[in-house]
Amino acid sequence: MTDRTTLDDQALDTLFREARTANKWQDRPVPDSKIEEIYNLLKFAPTSANSSPARFVFIRTPDAKARLKEALSPGNLEKTMTAPVIAIVAHDTAFYDKLPFLFPHADARSWFAGNPALAETTAFRNGTLQGAYLILAARAAGLDAGPMSGFDNAKVDELFLAGTTWKSNFLVNLGYGDNTGLFPRSPRLSFDEAARLE
Amino acid sequence: MTDRTTLDDQALDTLFREARTANKWQDRPVPDSKIEEIYNLLKFAPTSANSSPARFVFIRTPDAKARLKEALSPGNLEKTMTAPVIAIVAHDTAFYDKLPFLFPHADARSWFAGNPALAETTAFRNGTLQGAYLILAARAAGLDAGPMSGFDNAKVDELFLAGTTWKSNFLVNLGYGDNTGLFPRSPRLSFDEAARLE
């Protein structure tokens, strides 16, 4: 029975305490191999019944960025157009069709296939969990992340996800942040404001 | 312009590659100070407009566990009753009332206060992100996590959140896992199955 390792202070700073949402980027590309590396970390983090509903479109080319542009809110435009990579965090509304492979020890497909309300909540909740894993996996791999929900979801679905069962959830800019673009860190709720012990 | 640190292999294993959802627990308590330590990591990870809507009830006493029992599905009963701590990951449906403090540079309260649909989506999405941060912060702090959505949300709300604007989202068992309770790891989707480069 081995103990888990505790992360050291530098790792905790990189993931949580010193990491900041990037608004400005160094002129330094993110290779496709880095994107795969991040996926191959986040895929291991837990989802309900291993449902793994998140799907990702990683936008890097000028052409794809130009298409994305019209779906963005004005305040998010410049930082997104200059980001080396923009991840569309989506989820597959028909995620349950993969459950015979992902969760082979029970007929988990049947829990969701006939229950659209449960399927939708499960896809949104667990796809969002995986979006958070993406943010922290990117930080763990040395990148900065800039998550955003200020955009037109229907437009992104139309532009990038037409003809699929995928639906957009939120966006995450990825790259090497330029700290001169940072705002001062905003306050956080204290433990007593956000939590209760029972 | 400093580079971010990349986490080493041991840290990546602890967070993602070797970490597993615990089903059985060592007989080893989790002190309240550890719970606060985890909150003080997760609180820094990003949410939309710093909205920080997640609220947490950490259940540790036999009395509180006995109350929780009737809300659990049978398959989740034993591992939850034996966990040292169970976190109710909830969100505050009136989270926007804290925005004048959390996001002082704009009138962000007004974006949500008159728009219940946007407020609800924002609370659920960002509260879920913070639930994922809780799972990874717990692992970073040397604990194992066991997230679950197989329970009666309305019953948990009635038992633990009555008289508040908090609503339950999912549960996370926390403690020091006993690896003899692990199932073999289930498969994951390959990069090409879950992602696309554009």
Image: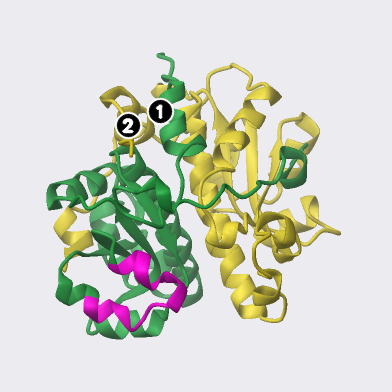
Chain colours: A green, B yellow
Asked if B118 appears above or below A196 in the picture, the reply is below
As drawn, which residue projects farthest toward the right? Answer: B163
Quadrant of image for the N terminus of chain B: top left
Tag shown at residue A11? 1
- Magenta stretch containing residue B31, yes or no? no
Asked if B90 appears above or below B96 in the picture, the reply is above
**Dot 2: chain letter:** B
**Dot 1: chain letter:** A
At label 2, the amino acid type is Thr
- Marks 1,2: beta carbons within 8 A: yes
Seen in the image, is B15 located left or right of residue A43?
right
Residue drawn where x is 40% and y is 46% of the image = A179
Q: Are marks 1 and 2 on the same chain?
A: no
Q: Residues within 10 Å of mark 2 (few under 14, many from 20)?
A: some
At label 1, the amino acid type is Ala
Seen in the image, is A50 located left or right of residue A16?
left
Name the one closer to the observer, A25 or A133. Answer: A25
> Mark 1: which secondary structure?
helix
Q: Which residue is mark 2?
A: B5
| Res. A73 in view | yes
Tag shown at residue A41? none
Residue drawn where x is 31% and y is 30% of the image = B7
Quadrant of image for the C terminus of chain B: bottom left
Residue B142 percent location from the top left of the image: 48, 23
| Res. B78 in view | no
Magenta region: which residues?
A: A66-81
Residue A163 in which image quadrant: bottom left
Q: Main secondary structure of the magenta part?
A: helix
Residue B48 in which image quadrant: bottom right
